Image: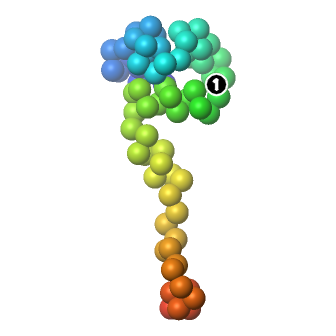
Amino acid sequence: MKSARKKDKLSVQKMADLSGLPYATIRKFESTGNISLRQFLMLYETVGDLKKVKALTTSSEPEFKSIEDVLRHA
């Protein structure tokens, strides 16, 4: 995350302002690696694309609407 922040030429304070997280939380994360998932996603949204994260959780399985659909794909 720190390298992404620096690549985007963001100071810790600017990232805090953009993400809504406290400055101290970002500094602690960059030095220890400890952060909640919610806070990580808030930071990632600032420097990345949350669509990539969403794609990781999207099922590639077909969505069945009827028993006939299930039987056709069995």
Classify mark 1: helix, strand or loop: loop
Counting from the top left corner in percent of width and height, residue 49 is at 39, 38
Counting from the top left corner in percent of width and height, residue 66 is at 53, 85
Q: Is residue 29 above or below residue 39?
A: above
Q: Residue at x 48, y 48 (%)?
A: 54
Q: Closest to the observer: 57 or 7?
A: 57
Q: Is residue 74 above or below residue 14?
A: below
Give the mark count: 1
Is residue 27 among the parts visible in the rendering?
no
The local crowd at label 1, few if under 14, some if 14 to 19, many if 20 or more residues have their Cα within 10 Å, is: some
Instruction: Indicate how the structure is coloured in the image.
Output: rainbow
Residue type, numbered disc 1: Ile
Q: Which residue is mark 1?
A: 35
Is residue 71 among the parts visible in the rendering?
yes
Q: Residue at x 48, y 44 (%)?
A: 53
Counting from the top left corner in percent of width and height, residue 33 is at 63, 22
Question: Quadrant of the image for the C terminus?
Answer: bottom right
Q: Is residue 41 above or below residue 20?
A: below
Q: Which residue appears farthest toward the front when viewing the image?
A: 66
Left or right: 8 as drawn, with respect to 38: left
Q: Residue at x 59, y 32 (%)?
A: 38
Counting from the top left corner in percent of width and height, residue 3 is at 43, 21
Q: Residue at x 64, y 24 (%)?
A: 35
Q: Quadrant of residue 9?
A: top left
